[in-house]
Image (cartoon, rainbow, N blue to C red):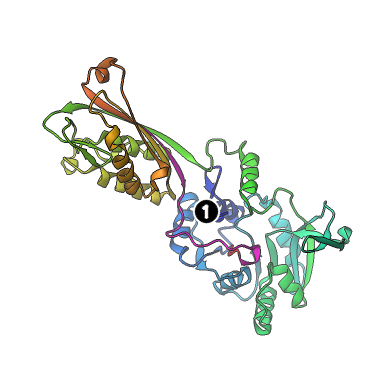
Amino acid sequence: MGAPPKQYRLLAGRPLLVWSLDIFAAYADRTRLVLVVPPGNEEYAAHLVREYTGLTPRVVAGGATRQASVAAGLAAIPDETGLVAVHDAARPLFSGQVLAEWREKLAGWGENHALVPVLPVADTLLETSGDTIRGIAPRDRMVTVQTPQLFHLSLLRRAHAAAAERGETDFTDDTSLVVRAGGTVHGVPGQPLNFKITTMADLAHAALLTEGDQAADSALRTGIGYDVHRFDAARPLVLGGVVIPDAEGLAGHSDADALTHAVMDALLGAAGLEDIGTHFPDTDPAWAGADSLALLAEVLAMLRARGVIPAHVDTTIIAEKPRLAPHIKAIRERLAGALGLPAHRVGVKATTHEGLGALGRGEGLAAMAVATLTPAPPGAAPEIADSDAEDPE
């Protein structure tokens, strides 16, 4: 799915991993939660979970394969007995109402037993070699496997240790690993909605399913900004951090960069934060003559703290004067650099007010902006593995 990693992508305004952790939130007072993430993501993931849920799970770095990641999670659990559930961050729609029943079942069985949700196969299964059909698999004896998968902790530890001793590293789920170690795995009815988010189509499907409950948010967030200033011949004109030569400047407490102010308000609005007047009031001498691009950097830090970054910004400058066409390219590039975006994701346009009103009389200049936010990758986004076997969830 590309960057950002799918576990951080938003579903109805909340990261997938948060949806998956919510399943176990009811047991948080008596359950140890361990979140296994790609190396280097630990601090980001912990912050994200605290921001959205208030939970403080143990966060550890995973490995190059799913098997290695689960082993890392097990190593973070000091207990030697009890039950453990392994769940994919990319399965956000599991209904946890059956968890208590499953735990009771497994607790009543011996330590060599495990429990896994399965679904019958609806489609015909064919065995292939390249693009050639070789045969038909017996569909009536096949099931698809889901998570969470429940185990006696001692059994799962033993199965991982045995696989490590044999040098086997390519198990794609813990059920297969436990069966290989001689454990008995019991299938229980899975949930059709508990599908794994593997492609953008899966994410779109999940968004449709959650729209009724979470209609207020979406995977992307959009905000609108507007700013207007009177002309002041004693000041330089600054737009998007670019000084426009031989032009009247704008009156204001900071450098009066109306374009950057409109962008800041659009970003803050998309993130659900207060406007720039709240964060940088014109009554505070600290902001007198301030460089608006420096203020924009502070806004971007606020967004990052909420787990979002700009994906696209579009702007329009409204003024009878000066003629801005020769400066549009420089403004776009300067603004894009400040936003951390490529220039093709920043729109800068200029128009007049057709002689109407105060702007039409040349008394001032206005700017409008629309900003779209997307989930922030944790630093430099890690590569996404090509196969589920190497997906460190």
The foreground one among 42 and 109 is 42
Q: Is residue 125 magenta?
A: no
For residue 313, say whether it is visible. Answer: yes
Q: Is-magenta flag for residue 386?
A: yes
**Which of the pair 38/347 is nearer the observer?**
347
Q: Quadrant of the C terminus?
A: bottom right
Q: Image quadrant of residue 311?
A: top left
Q: Is residue 277 visible?
A: no
Q: Residue furthest front?
A: 326
Q: Position of residue 1 (x, y in %)?
A: 58, 54
Q: Residue 181, percent across and down?
A: 74, 78
What segment is highlighted magenta in the picture? 369-390
Q: Quadrant of residue 138?
A: bottom right
Label 1 CA crowd tier, 10 Å (few <14, some 14–19, many 20+): many
Residue beneath label 1, please? 8
Which percent across, then down, holds residue 362?
A: 22, 21
Residue 287 x/y as whole percent: 19, 42
Horizontal side of 166 relative to 340 (left or right) equals right
Q: Quick check: 230 above or below 273?
A: above
**Relative to 164, residue 277 above or below:** above
Which residue is at a point 45% across and 66% down the rendered structure image? 40
The front one of 88 and 28 is 88
Snapshot quadrant of residue 175: bottom right
Q: Amino acid at mark 1?
A: Tyr
